[in-house]
Image (spheres, grey):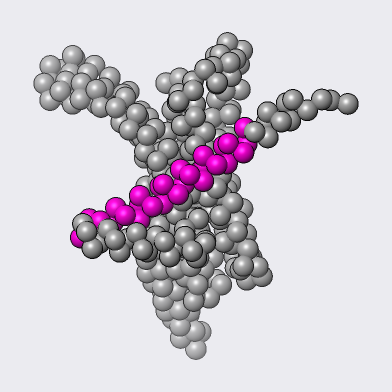
Amino acid sequence: MAGTNLLTLLDDITALLDDIATMSKVATKKTAGVLGDDLALNAQQVTGVSADRELPVVWAVAKGSFLNKTMLVPAALLISVWLPWLITPLLMIGGLFLCFEGAEKLVEKAFPAAKSNDHNEAADIDLVEYEKQKIKGAIRTDFILSAEIIVITLGTVAGASLLNQALVLSVIAVLMTIGVYGLVAGIVKLDDAGLYLLKQAQQTGNRFKEILGKGLLAAAPRLMQFLAFAGTVAMFLVGGGILVHGISILHHWQLTVTDYGLSHLGSVGEVIAPLLFDGTLGLLAGAMIVLIHHIMVRFIAKKPTT
């Protein structure tokens, strides 16, 4: 009798694990696009620090990301049970913040003098504080993207039991963090890998290692430049996408634009049109928030103190 109960328990555990694996696979496919944005954004966020501090910074952000998930997973489960209507407004606030950060980066690129004093202070006074600010910014961005991924995952397993939902969310959170920050660590150390291969080539005379090392050294700065660009674009795409899915009229307009792209450009237009719509919407929303933010800052600065 005890043996039968044990076999039944093992069978139930196997079925549960199989269900979790299946649901996790589906959730991973649905969140793959956001994971790509997460990779680009975080690789871009940790650039600008000294080479010997790159891995410690990535590790610090990864620890912050794990902490984000330990708060987000139970919060998402509680909100889905007690306050399901609150998920969309919270996501939209996060989306608007991403649009704002992206627009701020464009303003800094267009008007570098506006931030020159801040950069000089970071360089001349306290590089440690500058690094801390980079880490905080990366963790803040990770929080928003993680929240979106967890909500998408939650929607995928909405019909499952609370236990299954919790297990799938936990699996996705762990895999997402390890995958993203493992790749980020590899990307930021490409130049070191190139130097290592060149040293090996000099010692052994291996022509292949020399070519590969030079290729990595040449590719590393270009890849980081691309990721910096892709990270900014991703802010507008993700932020705009959140707004589109949260506001029905915007979603309707996006479908109209998608149909137009499909009718004129075929399957290519069907893919590109919604991306252009989301990106343009994110850019416009970010620009509006930046304008309001700068007006408020100037107003507060000019306001006489009592």
- Along the viewing direction, whichever of 227 and 173 lies nearer the viewer: 227
Residue farthest bottom in this picture: 1
* Residue 57 visible here: no
Q: Position of residue 158 (x, y in %)?
A: 50, 72
Image point 16% across, 20% down: which residue?
210
Q: Let me know if residue 272 is in the magenta part.
A: yes
Quarter of the image for residue 84 reads: bottom right
In the image, residue 96 above or below residue 129: below
Q: Going by the image, does 260 lie left or right of 104?
A: left
- Along the viewing direction, whichever of 105 and 216 lies nearer the viewer: 105
Q: How many marks?
A: 0
In the image, residue 209 above or below residue 203: below
Q: Position of residue 196 (x, y in %)?
A: 27, 21
Start-end of magenta stretch: 266-294
For the C terminus, give its image quadrant.
Answer: top right
- Along the viewing direction, whichever of 186 and 137 lies nearer the viewer: 137
For the stretch drawn in magenta, the main secondary structure is helix
Image point 37% across, 34% down: which residue?
229
